[in-house]
Structure formats: C-alpha cells, structure tokens
C-alpha cells in the first residue's frame, strides 16, 4: 500500500481553507509515477483513501492527510455500468419529460380561475444513489460516484406501474434496447380485483387476435386467483404503456396493481421497490 509523502513545511495542519493544499489527483500521480488522467481514474475507481476513508473526487484538496492507494487498484474495471431499478408506483420512469415544478401552467380560458398545480412526481433517477443499492445484488460491484453519471433510459413504464426500469452508461446496451425493443418480450404481472377464470379472459384474447385493433403480439394467462384478487401474467413484445389497462377494460377487470418483472432475458430478481442492482456480466437482454 502506498502512502503520501510528509506534509510540506508551512502547510496548515488539519482541515484548513478549501483552497489550501494540492489536488488529490496531483498527489496520487506523484505517488504512482503515472499521468494525471490515470491518477484521476484511479481515484474515481474508489481505490484511493484519505486517512482511511475512500475519496472519489480527484479535485479534493490534500493537506496533511495520509493518502493511500489500494495495492489491487486497476483501471481495467472502469467500464460502463447498467443499473436495474425496481421503480415504485407513482414515480416517473426517467424517460418522461413532463413539466417540472417550475414550468408555468397552461393559461385557463378567459373568465376562469387558474387551476392549482398538481404536485410534481418524483423521478426514478432520484432513487439511483448508493444508499438504495440492493443488498441482494450478487454482481460484486461497489457503488461509485461515477456510476450515477451520464445514465440513459430507454424502456418506458407508466407512472402508476412498478417494476423493472433500466439505466445504462453502456452505448452497446442502449443500442440493443433501442434497436431490438420491438422484439423483446416484457413480462408484466397484473393484479385485478376479484376472482378471474379463463372465460373472463376471452374478450382480451379476442382483442389480441383482431387485426383491426393493431395490437402488439401478446399472451395473457392466470397466475393465481382468489375471491379477493387475481394475478394475471401478460407477456408482450415491446414496451407498450397503457396496453394492460386497455385489455383489462375490454374484459371489465379492475386493475389494482401493475408490475413489470422482466425485459428480454433480464429479470428484476429480489430487488425491492425503490432499490437497484447492477446488471451482472453474464446477463444479456
């Protein structure tokens, strides 16, 4: 483990002014005999500690603190990541560009009072923090600050629904999701009120076969049924927000909850609502 050189004469002891000292990246570059860019990547990779605490900000100022670099530090593990989030209901999916809280409401017709503004909904992006990393994540990845930057979303999910949404830094994953979305199967679990039997699904099956409806390829089946509620499994090619509501309306079924469990070959796993996990190296959409 490498340690920083002793403090220079005249350096302030302790915290000092934020402008005092030198950049952490400069100190690490001196310690490792590497370029400033390699030092920044080493810091952003979570390999550097100040007085035993990991610091991921290359611009951090160093005074008399002890700087150490993990002997296992490697730049080979600095690839882009993909996060699988279990979006709770009534949270935006990260794709929806709805008017923010500062956007002015539409002007009402003359003579009418201006309607009160509905409270802004939370975006799924706000849940992508280290604190919400699922303890069930088996990928072995450590959450780093850089993992929450430049994340792209491309798989829509209605706000009222919960379930799997994808955020990625990897352009290959993003391209796969965009180009092959129409062929990817999405698995949704639809909870409806009351006990449902196979005959109740006939209007849905008829609508799916009707070419005039121009609906996507989909299959629906009963996963479980009880007097109080039933769970339907809807497997559909592509992301089609509103489809479950449309189909259940045809059968006179009242939706209580809707959750997406799988996109392509990637499933939500044991991630609870509001938490996320990393896409494992062996997983492919």
Image (tube, rainbow, N blue to C red):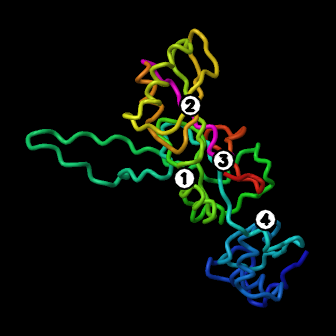
User: Disc 3 designates what residue?
Assistant: 276
Q: Quadrant of residue 26?
A: bottom right
Q: How far apart are marks 1 and 2 (CA)?
A: 31 Å
Check residue 53 in the rendering and tell me which mark sits there, or answer none: 4
Q: In which quarter of the image is residue 63?
A: bottom right
* Of callouts 1 and 4, the N-terminal one: 4
Please tell me whether mark 2 sits on a helix, a strand or a loop. strand
* Of callouts 2 and 3, the N-terminal one: 2
The residue located at (66%, 62%) in the rendering is: 147
Mark 2 neighbour density, 10 Å: few (under 14) some (14–19) many (20 or more): some
Check residue 59 in the rendering and tell me which mark sits there, or answer none: none
User: Disc 1 designates what residue?
Assistant: 125
The residue located at (76%, 84%) in the rendering is: 27
Q: Do the residues labelled 1 and 3 touch (CB within 8 Å)?
A: no
Please tell me whether mark 4 sits on a helix, a strand or a loop. strand
Q: Do the residues labelled 4 and 3 touch (CB within 8 Å)?
A: no
Residue 12 at x, y = what percent? 72, 82
Q: Residue 239 colored magenta?
A: no
Please tell me whether mark 1 sits on a helix, a strand or a loop. helix
Which one is closest to the eye, mark 2 or mark 4? 2
Q: Distance between the residues labelled 2 and 4?
A: 52 Å
Q: Distance between the residues labelled 1 and 4?
A: 27 Å
The residue located at (68%, 42%) in the rendering is: 267
Mark 1 neighbour density, 10 Å: few (under 14) some (14–19) many (20 or more): some
């Amino acid at each position: 483990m490498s340690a920083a050189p002793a403090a220079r004469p005249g350096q302030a002891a302790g915290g000092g002014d934020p402008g005092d000292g030198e950049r952490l990246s400069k100190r690490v570059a001196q310690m490792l005999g590497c370029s400033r860019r390699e030092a920044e990547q080493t810091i952003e990779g979570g390999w550097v500690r100040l007085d035993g605490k990991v610091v991921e900000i290359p611009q951090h100022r160093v005074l008399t603190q002890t700087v150490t670099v993990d002997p296992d530090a490697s730049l080979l593990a600095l690839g882009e990541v993909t996060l699988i989030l279990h979006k709770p209901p009534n949270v935006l999916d990260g794709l929806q560009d709805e008017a923010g809280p500062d956007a002015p409401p539409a002007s009402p017709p003359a003579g009418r009072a201006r309607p009160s503004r509905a409270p802004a909904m939370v975006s799924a992006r706000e849940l992508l923090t280290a604190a919400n990393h699922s303890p069930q994540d088996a990928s072995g990845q450590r959450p780093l600050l850089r993992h929450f930057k430049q994340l792209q979303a491309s798989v829509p999910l209605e706000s009222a629904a919960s379930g799997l949404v994808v955020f990625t830094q990897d352009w290959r994953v993003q391209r796969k999701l965009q180009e092959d979305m129409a062929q990817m199967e999405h698995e949704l679990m639809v909870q409806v009120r009351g006990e449902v039997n196979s005959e109740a699904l006939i209007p849905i099956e008829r609508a799916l076969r009707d070419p005039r409806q121009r609906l996507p390829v989909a299959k629906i089946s009963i996963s479980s049924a009880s007097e109080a509620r039933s769970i339907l499994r809807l497997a559909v090619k592509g992301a089609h927000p509103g489809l479950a509501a449309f189909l259940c309306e045809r059968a006179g079924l009242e939706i209580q909850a809707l959750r997406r469990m799988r996109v392509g070959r990637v499933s939500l796993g044991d991630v609870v609502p509001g938490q996320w996990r990393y896409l494992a190296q062996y997983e492919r959409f």
